[in-house]
Amino acid sequence: MPMDHSTWSSIAAEDFPFPEGVPASRLGDELSAMFVHPGPRVRDDQAYTAAARWIAEGRLDEVLEDLGDTAADRFTHPEIQARTFAPLVLRCVLARAVAAPGAVPGAAAERWYVPFAAWYPAERDTRGWDDSLGWLHAVAHGADAAAAFAQALPGRRAELLELCARRMTAAADHRYVQLEDARLARAICRILLVPGLSAEQATGWLSVVAEALEGGGPGPVPPWAFNTFATLQSLHLHLTRGLAEEGVPAHAGAVAANVAAVLQLPYHWLA
């Protein structure tokens, strides 16, 4: 029998102690169901907060693959909150897989990557916040998952950089207003920080951005171009300062120089 709403509220009020004696399979099923809930208190404040902690602690290792499979299936879900919380779940599962090798079969991450890569640049609802649904954050949550995939699947790093480039240049109805540009920039830095990228791989993804901007002329800046410029500005800052706990990527100088060259298109007054 599922735990009722008051039980989950009590767990949240007590700072998410693990409910000893409850089978992991039951917890996994309940958490997965809550990730689709339209109420932000249930979905975000309770389910995600609990899952993030318990996955990191290894409490849900026996159901990690099931949690990942369910999340990956939701990239085609009809409801936006279900689609945008799927990458958050995958981020947690992938981080645990990297921290505890063997917790997830090696083929699982590759299996999850395919639907994620199809969804991320194609999602049209890029609102960060909805007054009824709460945080949606397709761009930011997807960026976090992209960085996690880079750790779990280092052979996909160059592809993931191009995926981020396609996300920032994708047709959009909304400008980034909830720091999506910074989250995407942080993810790109984290992908660049994974050892082994050549200078060509570290900078090659910017050709996607350059091609998207080709042919731009006078007139109002469309939302996708605004988002691209905002992300590149944020990325330049991230490359210059580095990440507090992870440092500066090996090819930060080369990437920053290429980013600045692209930014001279809209900001022609730059030296």
Image (spheres, helix red, strand yellow):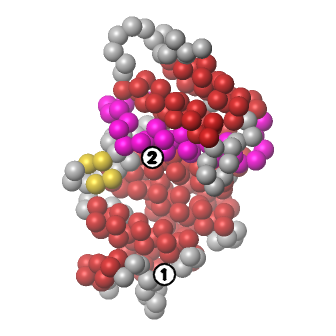
Residue 34 spot, x, y in % from top left: 34, 68
Residue 104 spot, x, y in % from top left: 63, 67
Amino acid type of the residue tagged 1 in the rendering: Ala
Question: Depth check: 219 or 172 in front?
Answer: 219
Judge whether 268 appears above or below 71 on screen: above
Q: Is residue 218 visible?
A: yes
Residue beneath disc 1: 24
Residue 244 spot, x, y in % from top left: 61, 52
In the image, taking residue 6 as reference, residue 241 lies left or right, namely: right
Q: Is residue 110 visible?
A: no
Give the number of the mark in front: 1 or 2: 2
Q: Which numbered disc flags the more N-terminal residue, 1 or 2?
A: 1
What secondary structure is found at the residue carrying circle 1?
A: helix
Identify the image quadrant of residue 134: bottom left
Amino acid type of the residue tagged 2 in the rendering: Ala
The CA span between labels 1 and 2 is: 29 Å
Which residue is most to the left? 132
In the image, taking residue 206 as reference, residue 73 lies left or right, namely: left
Other-residue count near label 2 (Cα within 10 Å), few / some / many at <14 / 14–19 / ≥20: many
- Highlighted range, magenta: 170-198
Residue beneath disc 2: 140
Residue 16 spot, x, y in % from top left: 41, 79
